[in-house]
Image (cartoon, rainbow, N blue to C red):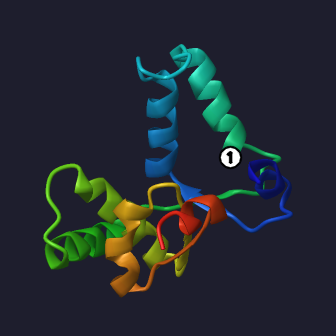
């Protein structure tokens, strides 16, 4: 799926926040195996650098204000602000479909207009 998105066979976007989470997961001491920063940096950059067709959405002022609005409306605290930032970045860019393995984290944003569309294996276990 990722390769299809990189090739433009599947329309896909991400954000700097999501890319930073991928980097963090790759370099985490609990990763199997944890990657050194140089390897993780290269791997993450390959997701979005040319010739990749994956669009990196801007987290701009409008997204920042939307993030704070979402966080307040849903009474999100601490680390959940990052989830609100991801949702706000998508919504401001008029992206309403999210493919995520963290369905529990994203359910709260359905009332904001976010639809969780996959993956099927995770959706089936969370209906």
The percent position of residue 94, horizontal first and vertical second, equals: 53, 81
Question: Residue drawn at (48%, 49%), measured in percent from left and top?
Answer: 18
Apparent side of residue 100 relative to residue 2 in the rendered image (left or right):
left
Q: Please, is residue 28 above or below residue 124 in the view? A: above
Residue 64 place in picture, x, y as percent: 30, 66
Determine the image quadrant of residue 105. bottom left
- Label 1 secondary element: helix
Q: Residue 111 placed where, x, y %? A: 34, 86
Q: Is residue 70 left or right of residue 52?
A: left
Residue 4 falls in image quadrant: bottom right
- Residue 75 rendering spot, x and y as whole percentages: 13, 70
For image coordinates 44% across by 31% down, the residue present is: 24
83, 55: nearer the viewer: 83
Can you identify the residue that label 1 sits on? 48
> 107 or 25: which is nearer to us?
107
Q: Is residue 102 left or right of residue 76?
A: right
How many residues crowd around disc 1 within 10 Å: few (fewer than 14), some, or many (20 or more)? some
Res. 62 in view: no
Q: How many marks?
A: 1
**Quadrant of the rendering where the N terminus is positioned:** bottom right
Q: Nearer the viewer, residue 82 or 100?
A: 100
Does residue 25 sit above or below 68 in this rendering?
A: above
Q: Write the residue at 45% across / 41% down.
A: 21
The structure residue drawn at horizontal position 47% and vertical position 32%, both measured from the top left corner, is: 25
Taking 64 as reference, is 27 left or right?
right
Whether residue 19 is visible, yes or no, is yes
From this view, report whether residue 67 is shown above or below residue 16.
below
């Amino acid at each position: 799926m990722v390769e299809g998105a990189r090739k433009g066979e599947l329309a896909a976007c991400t954000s700097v926040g999501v890319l930073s989470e991928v980097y963090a997961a790759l370099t985490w001491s609990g990763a199997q195996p944890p990657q050194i920063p140089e390897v993780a940096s290269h791997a993450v950059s390959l997701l979005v650098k040319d010739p990749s067709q994956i669009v990196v959405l801007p987290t701009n002022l409008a997204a920042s204000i939307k993030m704070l609005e979402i966080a307040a409306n849903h009474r999100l605290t601490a680390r959940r602000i990052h989830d609100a930032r991801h949702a706000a970045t998508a919504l401001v860019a008029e992206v309403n479909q999210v493919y995520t393995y963290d369905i529990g984290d994203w359910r709260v944003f359905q009332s904001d207009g976010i639809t969780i569309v996959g993956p099927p294996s995770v959706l089936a276990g969370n209906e």
